[in-house]
Amino acid sequence: MNRTIKWQFIFSFVSVSFIIIGAFSMMTLILLDNHFAKYVAERQESKLVAYTNDLEQLYENNGEWPNTIDFEQIGLQSLHNSIILKVYDNEQKILWRPTSSDELANKRKIQDSIPYIDKMMGEMDHVFVKTNFPLFNSGQKIGNVLFSYMGPTTYSEHDAFFLADMKNNLIIIATVTLVLSACFAVLFAKKISRPIIEVKNFTKKISKGDYVNLSPEKTDIKEIDDLILSVNDLSAQLESQQDIRNQLSSNIAHEIRTPLTTLKGNLEAMIDGIWEITDERLQNCYDEVNRITRLIGSIDKINEIESHQDILNKTSFDLYLLSKNISSNFEALFAKKDISYSLDGESLFITADKDKISQLITNILSNAAKFTPSEGKITLRISKKKNQAILTVADTGEGIHPQEISRIFERFYMSDPSRKNILSSQGIGLSIVKSIIKAHKGTITAQSDYGKGSIFTVILPIKK
């Protein structure tokens, strides 16, 4: 079942909190039980040692075992602490023991407290434990004392109440902590999910072609701010592409409408008998049909080039020699515009698709020649850096506006919309260049000093 990011975060956070707090509480309860049981056992042991010392002191004060009545204080005190004490001499003759009624009353008292202790602490094993301690005076054994009490751990009602109260407080603290964790998770989930939901709604509007709405406000979370910036960039790119498509549609419509209008006018004039049908007029009509055919063929060529841009037929060839051969095709154009052209570098063999690299160089040189005025200068340089071939084309043309330099490699983007010849404009040439370079795992960058010239730098792996 799909959950929203808000409920996914709340569920995950509360689950983790429950596991951590539950584990911590369980560990605390176990440690509390163990340490408190150890404390009660040590306290019971110290009581028995104290009674033993009191009996030995009683013997030392009298020089012998006193009368039975002298044992009363120690014995009754032990009964008060739910301990039955019996004193024997060396011949195992009993010196003191509580009366049968006192012993029975003490056992009844202990039995009556058992349900309360079990209720507070859970079911426990309750058996009478008997422990025998020898009695000494000046290193000589003078008898022994037998202690009987409810075990194995002698919890009093006060002990049970204290331990149960601690457990209840710990459960309350754990419950309150879980509730606070859930509240914190809800608040934090809202803080996280709100901008994401806004971005989602914003992208839905973008998908419907609405690019003018304001993007979500920035938050104090870096990743979400990065997401918002990325969505803003996407919106700007899509709006730009929409503008380009609109401009392209307008250009194509204009290119097709012009010859069609001419063709229609000529045919109507000849059909209506206004013009005489002559070979010359038929030839004009034929030329306009050819013009439309060439335009549609050019559009098909663009689609074909881009759809097969990743299919490479790699061979090894000399990049410098290829650049030299391509440059010769531009000699007439450079001479006509009085452009000074130079090719620098030396022989450099690379493994790549020769035809596509030829197209790459042709497009870049054509672009440079188009925007370089008369008496300008174009330089093509071939160099090597580590395992990379570097092709640089620098011109002294009009340059690229800073606001446009990041968009010149976009498909159908034209820095000057008034140019209507699609294949000769920047709208497709540099886009194809970038596609070819991308297919070869290379890079291309453009630098421009607006009004003074541009530099295009292509980096290709020598072998791939």
Image (spheres, rainbow, N blue to C red):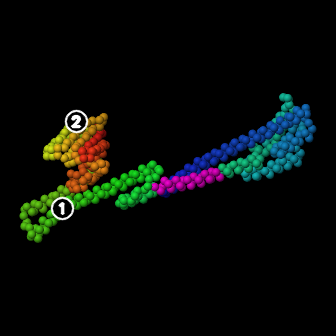
In magenta segment, residue 181: yes
Q: Which residues are magenta?
A: 172-195
Q: CA distance from mark 1 to mark 2?
A: 46 Å
* Of the image marks 1 and 2, the number of the one nearer the N terminus: 1
In terms of secondary structure, what is the magenta stretch mainly?
A: helix
Disc 2, SS: loop
Residue 149 x/y as whole percent: 80, 44
In magenta segment, residue 96: no
| Amino acid found under the numbered disc labelled 2 | Gly
In the image: residue 261, left or right of residue 445 = left
Q: Do we see residue 360 in this rendering? A: no
Report the residue at 88% width, 48% height from top: 101
Report the residue at 30% width, 45% height from top: 438
Label 1: which residue? 258
Q: Do we see residue 306 in this rendering? A: yes
Report the residue at 60% width, 49% height from top: 21
Residue 205 x/y as whole percent: 39, 60
Question: Farthest top residue?
Answer: 139
